[in-house]
């Protein structure tokens, strides 16, 4: 069993909250979709699945219905019947049937064409990274160099980490395959591609599996946007550990390294608080018994690692890599040990301070943390990517689609947003205390060139199904594109202050001119009607750009809002905002006034959408009532985007939640930990 230390809480054990009508509707839609998948099966397949007779008869009867309306009514009836049965065995049967199907001849024709062209030296892009043995045969590959195992389905998109890493490794000359959402109870999926020559890459996917599987109140999530069919039945809890275990189980005796990566591994690489178990857990590298861990975005580190393994050279000192050692390396900073942080909240805070401050690619030092008689060794962070390096990554030929092998299992909802969206930059210097982006992507914003983004926009304009609308152009924060602090780029992040909190640093010098140029250029591309900004804006950053603020906001309001523009004030009470690391509320009112005036001038019915958080550490019921009053009187809205704070690994807010202390002052703060109390806070704005 995993050695964890339970932290006492006063969690409320009250009955489950009554489901809302919207929640019931979502569940009905998911059940109806399962019914739609059932009716596509043959009669023999339907009869073989364990289900009640009345449900089976209803499914079989659809095959005799020819009227579209009658068929639609029957599918709704099937959905209502499924509410009364356990659908898990049905979904598992559907999954096994879908996995047993082969890829179509047309899909293989594309692979054959790619291989033939490659032999001729034409060098056309590879359609998808292989995920089946049949594809390997068609490619003439006997063995892959690297196999990536992911908690997401295989969506070949620049927004999906496993696809990006796979494409980057392939571009570097390695043979890479992907196994998406393998069955952890069977060898069928994990052994499908054989044993890799160099290493296994294991990721939980685009979201930490415990965040993907559970709500802020600890309830199991019904849906998953990265799983075909939308039903949350493919991603195991603690997916990185689960996938490592099945590799070790079904490839016993193999000495091929297992390398962890992705956001779950990255944010759990040192001793961390885990909300679901309410405990401080060891580094995930210890708990999984994997060999190595690549943290951060990972492209540079993973290519260096692959080259070192291929050459048989030492890889333990590669930047951006963690490993376990019995000895302390020289000149590395030692954090309080796992055993110490279990027993002492102040040492837990000290460990996180050192961890956070050594996350910069220029100033970050190597770290070690003792676990028992061994050490977690974290090498210094990988260097930031140059614009040219970033362009090369995003210029790779992503299919922007779900691999055909998985497409038969159903639609993946994430594609509705990301298929026709463009990532323009990565990283965030906002450093909100509840957000882990600064730890995973870095505090230095890295932007692509305008030319690279325009090239991608032209590709999207030519894709099947594109109707002229780019759904998002942005990054973690849309208006951080195109500028950075020159001092930070030369000397690294400041150790004693932040770029935007408590106010915008004068050294940053916000400049929206490059994004203005980009937005205007995109509007001129044939086939593009609109390019929306859906990532959200930092209005405090915008108002500090005295030269371009008015012009930039006018461009956004006039041409790049899809009806609602996202902003994230999160709260309005000054002491809560301070604990969140967020700016004061004055600039929010300024934004509302300017936005409303510009929308009226452009004759557009547009609104600001406000993201707010309930039950953040330091926030009481009284604070939520004051927030409610402010929203009613000043913003004059009924907020729809209100979420309960979720303590995710490697954030300062989670540190506050765990310890009950302000990590910057040492003062005790109120932390709402009961389910009933959290729901009450959220209900005030409901």
Image (cartoon, rainbow, N blue to C red):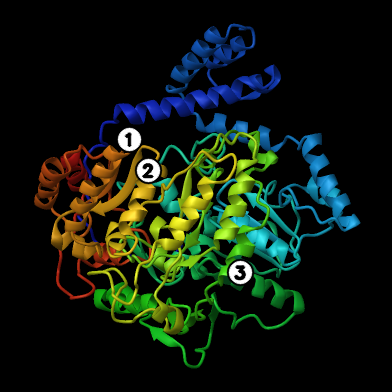
Q: What is the number of the mark on residue 249?
A: none
**What residue is shown with label 2?**
558
In this rendering, the label closer to the viewer, 1 or 3: 1
Instruction: Depth check: give the residue in front, 248 or 516.
Output: 516
Residue wearing tag 1: 604
Residue 359 coordinates in the image, percent (x, y)? 43, 76
Which dot, 3 or 2, sits closer to the camera? 2
Residue positioned 52% across, 52% down in the render: 521
Task: Please provide percent x and percent y for residue 515.
Answer: 45, 58
Q: Quadrant of residue 404?
A: top right
**Comes first in the chain, label 1 or label 2:** 2
Q: Quadrant of the C terminus?
A: top left
Residue 641 against residue 397 in the figure, above or below? above
Q: Which residue is mark 3?
A: 389
**What is the secondary structure assignment of the residue under circle 3?**
helix
The answer to whether residue 154 is seen in the rendering is no
């Amino acid at each position: 069993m995993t050695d964890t230390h339970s932290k006492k809480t006063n969690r409320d054990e009250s009955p489950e909250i009554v489901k809302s009508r919207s929640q019931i509707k979502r569940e009905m839609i998911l059940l109806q979709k399962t019914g739609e998948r059932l009716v596509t099966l043959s009669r023999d397949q339907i009869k073989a699945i364990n289900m009640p007779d009345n449900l089976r008869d209803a499914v079989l009867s659809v095959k005799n219905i020819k009227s579209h309306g009658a068929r639609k009514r029957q599918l709704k009836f099937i959905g209502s019947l499924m509410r009364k049965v356990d659908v898990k065995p049905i979904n598992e049967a559907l999954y096994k049937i879908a996995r047993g199907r082969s890829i179509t001849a047309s899909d293989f024709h594309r692979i054959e064409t790619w291989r033939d062209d490659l032999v001729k030296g034409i060098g056309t892009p590879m359609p998808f990274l292989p995920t089946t043995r049949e594809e390997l045969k068609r490619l003439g590959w006997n063995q892959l160099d690297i196999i990536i195992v992911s908690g997401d389905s295989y969506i070949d998109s620049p927004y999906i980490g496993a696809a990006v890493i796979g494409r980057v490794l392939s571009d570097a000359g390695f043979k890479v395959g992907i196994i998406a959402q393998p069955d952890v109870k069977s060898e069928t999926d994990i052994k499908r591609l054989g044993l890799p020559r160099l290493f296994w890459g294991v990721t939980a996917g685009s979201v930490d599996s415990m965040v993907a599987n559970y709500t802020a109140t600890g309830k199991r999530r019904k849906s998953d946007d990265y799983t075909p069919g939308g039903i949350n039945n493919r991603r195991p809890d603690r997916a990185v550990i689960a996938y490592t275990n099945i590799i070790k189980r079904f490839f016993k005796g193999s000495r091929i390294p297992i390398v962890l990566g992705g956001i779950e591994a990255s944010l759990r690489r040192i001793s961390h608080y885990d909300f679901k178990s309410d405990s401080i857990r060891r580094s995930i590298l210890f708990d999984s018994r994997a060999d190595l861990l690549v943290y951060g975005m990972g492209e540079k580190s993973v290519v260096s690692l692959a080259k070192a393994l291929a050459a048989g050279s030492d890889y333990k000192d590669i930047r951006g890599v963690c490993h376990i050692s019995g000895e302390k390396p020289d000149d590395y900073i030692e954090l309080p040990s796992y055993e110490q942080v279990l027993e002492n909240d102040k040492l837990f805070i000290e460990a996180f301070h050192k961890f956070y401050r050594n996350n910069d690619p220029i100033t970050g030092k190597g770290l070690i943390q003792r676990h028992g008689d061994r050490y977690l060794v974290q090498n210094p962070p990988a260097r930031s990517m140059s614009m040219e390096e970033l362009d090369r990554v995003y210029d790779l030929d992503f299919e922007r689609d779900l691999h055909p092998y998985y497409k038969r299992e159903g639609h993946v909802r994430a594609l509705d947003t990301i298929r026709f969206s463009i990532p323009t930059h990565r990283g965030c210097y906002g450093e909100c205390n509840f957000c882990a982006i600064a730890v995973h992507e870095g505090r230095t914003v890295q932007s692509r060139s305008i030319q690279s983004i325009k090239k991608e926009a032209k590709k999207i304009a030519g894709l099947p199904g594109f109707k002229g609308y780019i759904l998002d152009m942005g990054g973690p924060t849309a208006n951080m594109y195109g500028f950075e602090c020159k001092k930070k780029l030369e000397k690294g992040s400041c150790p004693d202050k932040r770029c935007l909190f408590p106010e915008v640093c004068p050294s940053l010098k916000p400049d929206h001119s490059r994004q203005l140029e980009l937005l205007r250029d995109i509007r001129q591309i044939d086939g593009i009607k609109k390019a929306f900004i859906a990532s959200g804006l930092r209005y405090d950053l915008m108002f500090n750009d005295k030269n371009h603020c008015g012009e930039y906001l006018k461009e956004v309001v006039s041409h790049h809002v899809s009806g609602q523009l996202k902003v994230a004030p999160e709260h309005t009470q000054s002491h809560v905002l301070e604990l969140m690391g967020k700016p004061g509320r004055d600039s929010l009112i300024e934004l509302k006034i300017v936005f409303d005036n510009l929308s009226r001038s452009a004759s557009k019915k547009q609104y600001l959408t406000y993201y707010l958080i309930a039950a953040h550490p330091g926030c009481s019921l009284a604070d939520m009532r004051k927030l409610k009053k402010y929203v009613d009187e000043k913003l004059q809205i009924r907020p729809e985007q209100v979420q309960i704070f979720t303590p995710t690994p490697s954030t300062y807010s989670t540190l506050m939640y765990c310890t009950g202390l302000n990590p910057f002052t040492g003062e005790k703060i109120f932390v709402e930990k009961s389910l009933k109390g959290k729901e009450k806070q959220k209900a005030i704005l409901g």
